[in-house]
Image: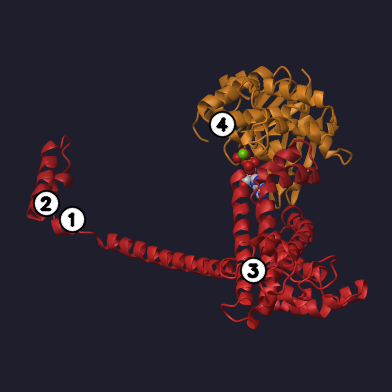
Amino acid sequence: MAKKEQDLQQVVENAIAEQKVPHVKFKGIDPKNIDVDRLTKPSKETRQEWWGRGLTFLAIILIGMLIVAIIGFVGMHGLATFIDNKVNIFHFLFSTDWNPGAGKNHVGAAAMIVTSFAVTLLAALIATPFSIAVALFMTEYESGKRVQLLQSVMELLVGIPSVVYGFIGLMVVVPAVRTIFGGTGFGILTATLILFVMVLPTITSLTVDAFKAIPKDLRKSSSALGATKWQTIYHVVLRAACSRIMTAIIFGMARAFGEALAVQMAIGNAVLMPYNLVSPAATLTSQLTSQMGNTVMGTLPNNALWSLALLLLIMSLVFNFLVHLIGKKS
Amino acid sequence: MTNVMEAKNVKLKYGNFEALHGISLAFPAQKLTALIGPSGCGKSTFLRCLNRMNDDIDDIKITGEILLEGKDIYHSHIDLVALRKKVGMVFQQPTPFPFSVFDNVAYGLRIAGVKDKELIEQRVEESLKQAAIWNETKDNLQRNALAFSGGQQQRICIARALAIRPEVVLLDEPTSALDPISSSEIEETLMALKQKYTFIMVTHNLQQASRVSDQVAFLMNGELIESGSTQEMFLSPKKEITNNYLNGRFG
Ligand SMILES: Nc1ncnc2c1ncn2[C@@H]1O[C@H](COP(=O)(O)OP(=O)(O)O)[C@@H](O)[C@H]1O
Ligand SMILES: [Mg+2]
């Protein structure tokens, strides 16, 4: 400490000696008055910085551990089907025979996989044009009160719990589909119609952001070149927002793919390969929610459900990956 | 000397605020007119009147006449699209569309329904040459226009405006966002193009106005104080206030 103190005083003295332009304040510094301890010890702010950093790291490590634990847990149980119960993974992916209680040759998830993708793609397909139209209305054609109203409606739609969507689906859409198409009213079409409403606000609000991110000057430049409003929208706005619209659609699809409750209430929960849109079917999520109370931990039927969960987890990773891929490309 | 455009007693109100108090000014063909004046005096507002870019603004009221080849552009029979094909515009910030250079320059033609590929290609090349950006873009016409430097982007924007062969090109401080070298390149480009087009340029830079313009109009507080040939204006302005402004006593 004493050495450090001397060093510091030396530095100050040297500086004063070398000082070319006499500077009043500098001369006034008396090396003896310098509180070396205070200067060489970490300040209060520095210690706060350490604390802040420490807490942040701690939180990150905890969350990281949690994520690893979730993935590890789902992975372990999900893979047990194939490792412990010796289910053939190709059989799992491509067979439509789902009856895990009957043994390892009856664990085929293909029907649910196909149904999950069917409802997801159909819901996104129907929702996208509506979302783009609403987003265009909100950004290009309207401003002020009506936009705010639409915005609130969209936020409201996001906030409605999925059980309410499912309930409405069950009470309104199922009977309607039954009356129009016959059958039970449960099935992919019904689930799609419910999911369409559920993903609409997601896709719309992200598309609105995409349009808003396009500089006003681009629109002005376009109209200054003699473009009509619609030409500007079609050739500049949509084109420039294309990759972000794709991202919006993928976020919507991720939501549809992962939605369980509302789908379960409307799809009929019959693990069958869907050959039409109005017969009962089951998605990965609906099968999970409807069956998880009926199996015993550690048995094949339980492990088989874990495998479905693992598949869902992998799909959400794929959706994320796609979003990143599109983000990088543009 | 014929006048391509002529503004007659143009008044403009943003709501209750009158930004232009009756401006009358003629724009001779194949000349560059510089609009100068302190900031907020209405230069951009006036310029935007000339291709009706103000039309979208809510609660705006424009009176007076602006004649393009003898016809009032605010007359109800005038088609906005047709007007903007005759009166092009280049903005302060370079505003290339986020797609290829070729598509940028071809934009106006395609919008106008030109399908002929050869004509488009030929126009794109010509326009890029006119805007003196051909050498830098000819080998990467498919590259995204945003990948070019600010000065290059601005010249791509000039090429884009020229591609539809307008009569008049409006420029709103086209070099103020650029570095001095890019600015002087743009100035040279404009000088070379004066034979073909009529330019009306807002500029903050008095030296630039003296270098490139043939006619100068000095605006202040929404009023046209004085206009005349560049030489007259810089050497012997009629009004004291013009003299003060041009000599940097305020602004
Ligand atoms: N869209 C607008 N709404 C209301 N007032 C405006 C608008 N645009 C410009 N103004 C006002 O009009 C005046 C002239 O502006 P502007 O033409 O941009 O000046 P300059 O280009 O000479 O700097 C300014 O007082 C400005 O505040
Ligand atoms: Mg301006």
Q: Is disc 1 in contact with disc 2, using a CB cutoff of under 8 Å?
A: yes
Q: Badge 1 sits on which subunit?
A: A
Which residue is denoted by mark 1 in the rendering?
A: A40
Separation (CA) of disc 3 from disc 1: 59 Å
Q: Chain B drawn in what color?
A: orange
Separation (CA) of disc 3 from disc 2: 65 Å
> Which quadrant holds the N terminus of chain A?
bottom left
Where disc 2 sits, the SS reads helix
Callout 1: CB less than 8 Å from ligand 1: no
Where disc 1 sits, the SS reads helix
**By what rule are the colours in the image chosen?**
by chain
Where disc 3 sits, the SS reads helix
Residue depth check, mark 3 versus mark 1: number of the one nearer the observer: 3
Callout 2: CB less than 8 Å from ligand 1: no
- Residue A124 rendering spot, x and y as whole percentages: 75, 60
Which residue is denoted by mark 3 in the rendering?
A: A308
What's the amino acid at mark 3?
Answer: Leu
